Amino acid sequence: MAAMNPQDALVHLMIAVAAADGQISGIERREFTVLLGTLPVFEGFDESRLMDIAQDCGALLDEDDGLDRIIANVRAAVPQTLYETAYALAVEVVSADVSASQPELRLLEMLRDAFELDRLTAGAIEHSARVRYRKL
């Protein structure tokens, strides 16, 4: 596979996180749309490519080491200054469903390690998402 651009790598990451529990919910799909359409990191992203990127990601996830490869691709494609952003995107996707599954939590742990995020930074990102998705 050729080197990925940063936006594609971030989309792969969001899809992998959404698929971690075995399915991508409608809420998670809606969250992709919101994130892709509003965040500066996705400025200029061609949303018509989303289906092709999702298929590429699905093919990677079907491989034995697919998740590790996706994480490696993100680390290779995304500047280190955006590792926190990548983690925040993953947390947003997990939080959209309001409750996180064990596979999603395990993937977030893998991402914290891969991005070498300190506990305070990761905790702040997670707390911020929790308060945004609370219900009455």
Image: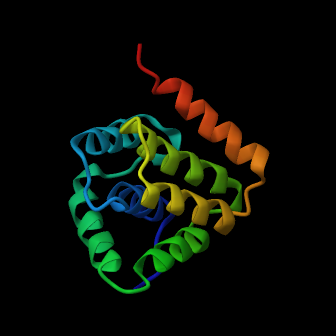
Residue occupying image coordinates x 60% and y 31%? 128
Image coordinates of residue 96 in percent, x first then y, are 39, 37
Considering only vertical position in the picture, is 43 above or below 46? Answer: above
Image coordinates of residue 29 in percent, x first then y, are 27, 45
Considering only vertical position in the picture, is 106 above or below 46? Answer: below
Left or right of 68 on screen, residue 55 = left
In terms of depth relative to the viewer, which is nearer, 39 or 108? 108
Residue 19 figure quarter: bottom left
Residue occupying image coordinates x 68% and y 47%? 122
Image coordinates of residue 133 in percent, x first then y, are 45, 27
Q: Quadrant of the N terminus?
A: bottom left
Q: Quadrant of the C terminus?
A: top left
Image coordinates of residue 40 in percent, x first then y, are 51, 40
Left or right of 27 on screen, residue 87 = right
Residue occupying image coordinates x 51% and y 62%? 107
Residue occupying image coordinates x 69% and y 42%? 123
